[in-house]
Image: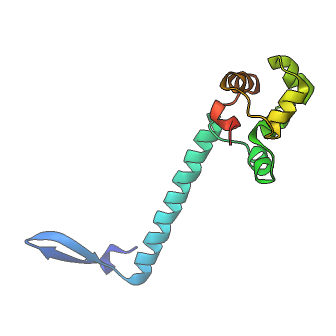
């Protein structure tokens, strides 16, 4: 943008408006959009590096119909047997919880979140 193309309009002796060619205005908006996009990308990368994001694999599994518990269990490479043994419940009971046939207790979900290394909220729909 060439400052010579900008007209300054004053009010009470102070700059009030800047009038500039439309193409300069469009370039300025594009640059602002680029900076906004860069800021959003930087923020997403910081969240990812801090572990504050959910992997795309989990999101896709849930969108495809898996329960959050199943998606995280599979992502962490636990079989139903392994996870059931780890938290002290039967494979059948855990399967029923995973399939939404039983609800499970808050304490059970706390144990699952600890073993799967996720927030409790990440396991419930």
Q: How many marks?
A: 0
Quarter-of-image position of residue 120 = top right
Rendering coords of residue 125 (x, y %): 68, 43
Identify the residue shown where x is 59% and y is 40%: 47
Residue 69: percent from the left, percent from the top? 77, 36
Q: Quadrant of residue 89?
A: top right
The relative height of residue 123 versus residue 116 in the rendered view (above or below) is below
**Location of residue 109 with respect to 3 vertically, above or below:** above
Residue 68, given in percent of the width and then of the height, sits at 75, 40
Q: Residue furthest front?
A: 102
The answer to whether 90 appears left or right of 62 in the picture is: right
45 or 115: which is nearer to us? 115
Rendered residue at 81%/39% (across/down): 101
List the single residue furthest toward the bottom: 22
Q: Considering depth in this image, is 7 or 86 the residue closer to the camera?
A: 86
Q: Which quadrant of the structure image shows residue 75?
A: top right
Visible in this render: residue 79? no
Q: Would you say residue 92 is visible in this rendering?
A: yes
The residue at 55%/46% (across/down) is 43
In the displayed structure, does residue 94 sit left or right of residue 105? right
Residue at the left extreme, as displayed: 12
């Amino acid at each position: 943008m060439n400052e010579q193309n900008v007209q300054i309009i004053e009010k009470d002796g102070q700059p009030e408006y800047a009038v500039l060619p439309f193409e300069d205005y469009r370039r300025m908006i594009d640059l602002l959009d680029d900076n906004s996009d860069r800021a959003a990308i930087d923020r997403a990368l910081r969240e990812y590096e801090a572990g504050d994001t959910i992997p795309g694999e989990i999101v896709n599994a849930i969108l495809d119909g898996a329960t959050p518990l199943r998606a995280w269990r599979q992502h962490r490479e636990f079989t139903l047997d392994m996870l059931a043994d780890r938290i002290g419940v039967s494979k059948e009971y855990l399967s029923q919880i995973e399939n939404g046939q039983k609800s499970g207790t808050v304490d059970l979900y706390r144990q699952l979140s600890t073993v799967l290394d996720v927030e409790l909220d990440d396991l419930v729909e």
